[in-house]
Every structure is written in C-alpha cells, then in structure tokens.
Amino acid sequence: MELLFLIATIGLILGLKFMGDPARAVLGNAVAAISVVIALIGVAITSYAPEKGAGMFNIILVVCLLAAGGIIGRTLAMRVPMTGMPQLVAMLNGFGGLAAVVIALIEGIAHPIGDDMRTTGGLLLLSAVFGGVAFTGSLVAHSKLEGKKLPKAKPVHILAARVLLWGMVALFVAYMVAPVPFMSFTTLLILMAVLSLIYGALFTLPIGGADMPVLICFLVALHGIVAILAGLFFEDTVMLIGGVLVSATGVLLTLAMSKAMNRTLGSVLKGVIKRDSVGAEREQDIRPISSPETASLLAFSKQVAIIPGYGMAVSQAQGVCQEMQVMLERMGATVHYIIHPVAGRMPGHMNVLLAEANVDYDKIIAMEDANDVMDRYDAVLVIGANDVVNPAAETDPGSSIHGMPIIKAYAAKQVIVLKRGMATGYSGEVNLLFDRANCRLLFGDARSSLRAIIDELKRI
C-alpha cells in the first residue's frame, strides 16, 4: 500500500514539473490525474478494515462516491465553455474549502477533543478557518467573474473583515495557551467556522476585478494549506505532499502576479474603494476603422503583434486568430503574440486559449521584451484586451490600475482595437489608449471581425 502512495506522490511531482513546460503540459496534466486516481485507489483499499467494523460496504461507498465525483467533474469540464473556466476554477476551489469545513466539524463533534489534545484541536480549528475563507471567498470571486451584482464595497467592509481576522487570531491563540478552557471545543470550532465564512466574503468583496487573477491564486494557496492540515490530521502522506505542492504553487503565482501588477500582495488583498479618475471625466475622441481598412493595413505590415484579452475568450476567436496569423506570415509578415501576465480572469488564461488554437509557443513573447521594441511593430492588433493596454496605468494617479505595468501598445506605429462597444474593462476604467492618434477601433464581435479581415486579405 505504501508503494501505491509513493507512486502517486512521485507522479504528482512529475506532473507539476511537466506542466511547467508548454510542450509537455498535456502530459503533465495526464500524469497528475493518473497519480490522483492511484492515490484514491489506495484510499479505497485502506478503508477496508473488518476488525474495526469497516467492511466491504466502506469500499463500495468510497468507490461509488469517487465515481460520482468523477462523472460530475468530467461533465462540468466538458460542458463549461472556455470563457467559464475561471469561474469553474473558483467554484471547485470553493468546494475544496467547504469539504475542509465539513470534515473539521464532523471530526470535532463526533470525536470529543480533550484539553490534552490541543495540537489536534488546533489543526481542526485552522482547517475550519482556512477552509471557510476559501469557500466564501471563492463564492464571491465566482460571482464577480460571472458579473453578478454584489453589494458595493465600503470602508466598513474592510474594517469588519479586519476585526473578524484579529478576533479569530485571538480566539485561536487563547485556545492554544489558556491554562483552562474558556469554552467547549465544539462551541469554539463552530464559532470559528462561522466567523471564517463571514470573513471570507468580507475580505474578498473589496478586491477589484483587475485583481481577480491574484485573488484566485491566493485562494488556491489557502486550499493547499487546508490539504496540508488534513494530511497532518489524518497522517496521509499523499495529501500532505499534494497540499504542499498546491500551496507552494499558489503562493508563487500570487507573488508573481502581484509583481506583474507592480503592487504588493498586501495592497491587493486590502482591496480598493474605487476613486474618481481623470479618464472617467473625459469625453473620448475615437476613430473607427472598417474591416477592409484593417486588412489593408495588416497586408502591408512587416511586423505585427497580437495582444489577446478576455474578449477573445468570450467570442472564442482564438482559432480564427491563428488562421489570420498563418495568412499574414504567408504574405511575408512576422507575427508575435504578447500576453500580459494578468490578462483574462485567471493565471495563464490567454496561454490556454492560444494553446487550444495550436499557436506555436515560440511566437509568444514576454511583455517586458515586447515593450522594449514596441516601436518596431507596424501594426498591433488588440483583441478583447482593455486594462492591460490602458495608458491610465502610467499617467492617471487617480486610476485604480495606476502603477500596473502594461503592454505599451501605444508605442507601435498603428494600433487597432477590436471591441464590441465602448464598455470599460473589468476594472471599470476608461481606456486612454483610444484617445491616441495612432489608435483606431474596429467595432463588432471579435470572431466575426477577424473572419471579415481574413476574407478581405484573400482579396488582396
């Protein structure tokens, strides 16, 4: 049995390593999935313990639950469109947090925790707290990503969240160091679980839409910590190592995303109460462009850059975009894709889209490298991106995205932005790029617009 768990552990580590390489990402995902199945088989076998009253019924129950979970998971994965992947990630992360809360409550209530078992009790309290925060935090993140109407964040929400946080810290410390119990463990556990659920919602509510990738990474890290605590409690090596890998990955991604936005993690998690920006008070002077004009401009460009954003995911335009890229290359142009680290609604969102369209990874260049040579591009095509190319991040101190590094599309010779309308980006900030003399807007669905451009290119 230990051999099964060892194989599963090695598989998880290898799977994560493979996922770091775009060429082997699919293999890494498969290896990790198989490793989890091996670990689950081990769990099903170890659940058979007739001497403890756990007979064949336990194995059948575990197998049925695993099968049901697998069927539901596969159904969700197949039915949810690419645009819904960030929401799905948030929802699944929330379910993991909820499971941790339920397990902690069951263990704490069904098996009384005496005063001489404070270490065990501490693990259960931490599991309930981290799980509760991950659950309600993920629910709020899911609602934000879905565009659902939520209460407007106010300073009182931030204050209440801080009071709850320090209250939970005080209760936990008091439980661990108090010479005599100040309340029953069951009561304390339920209280901490309830407070954590409230805190998760209040803590997430003020975090702005532009910070969603950072928030999702942070919640993933919390989920990993919950798995670590569960692994320690149940003395499960695979769960412990899996939790370490998940939490470490979540923390590293969180820090990387924060760095990409030129912000500290603390400033992101504190949330932003939206201020009035200079751009919001301006009436923009925009210059529309037609599909034939766009095709003509691209046809005579030698250096072309494509900047994808969430709008590409919404319109499912990645395949048509790759088709246009191939056509431009046949006409003698050099085409690159420039991806902002926080573009989309989750880490790596745009990379997943382009991989789905079989875009060669060598054609994707880093934002920093692209910014250094942006003036060499004859044309930059911005497809569904908004905040990540907004000069307000550099010029408007009142903007909620001020200080965030952006792709300096405005430095190219010509910029064409594909948009459905004049709606703002997810941060709610007006895009000052549209005021630039070298920027023109092609209105319409991105997929339809790209198809029209391809048709025009065929006529040239």
Image: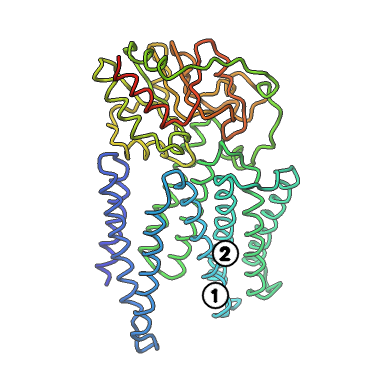
Up/down of 311 relative to 176, above or below: above
Q: What kind of element bears circle 1?
A: helix
Q: Which residue is mark 1?
A: 106
Residue for point 70% across, 47% down:
151
Q: Is residue 89 left or right of residue 331?
A: right
Q: Residues within 10 Å of mark 1 (few under 14, many from 20)?
A: few
Residue for point 43% across, 34% down:
312
**Residue 113, image quadrant:** bottom right
* Sequence-first disc among 1 and 2: 1
Up/down of 370 relative to 235, above or below: above
* Amino acid type assigned to the residue bearing label 2 in the image: Ala
Residue for point 64% across, 49% down:
203
Residue 58 is situated, as x and y percent measured from the top left of the image, at: 38, 81
Q: Quadrant of the C terminus?
A: top left
Q: Which of these two is toward me, 1 or 77?
A: 77
Q: Which of these two is toward me, 374 or 429?
A: 429
Residue 63 is situated, as x and y percent measured from the top left of the image, at: 34, 74
Q: Residues within 10 Å of mark 2 (few under 14, many from 20)?
A: many
* Amino acid type assigned to the residue bearing label 1 in the image: Ile
Q: Which residue is mark 2?
A: 128
Q: What kind of element bears circle 2?
A: helix
Residue 296 is situated, as x and y percent measured from the top left of the image, at: 37, 13
Up/down of 51 relative to 78, above or below: below
Q: How many marks?
A: 2
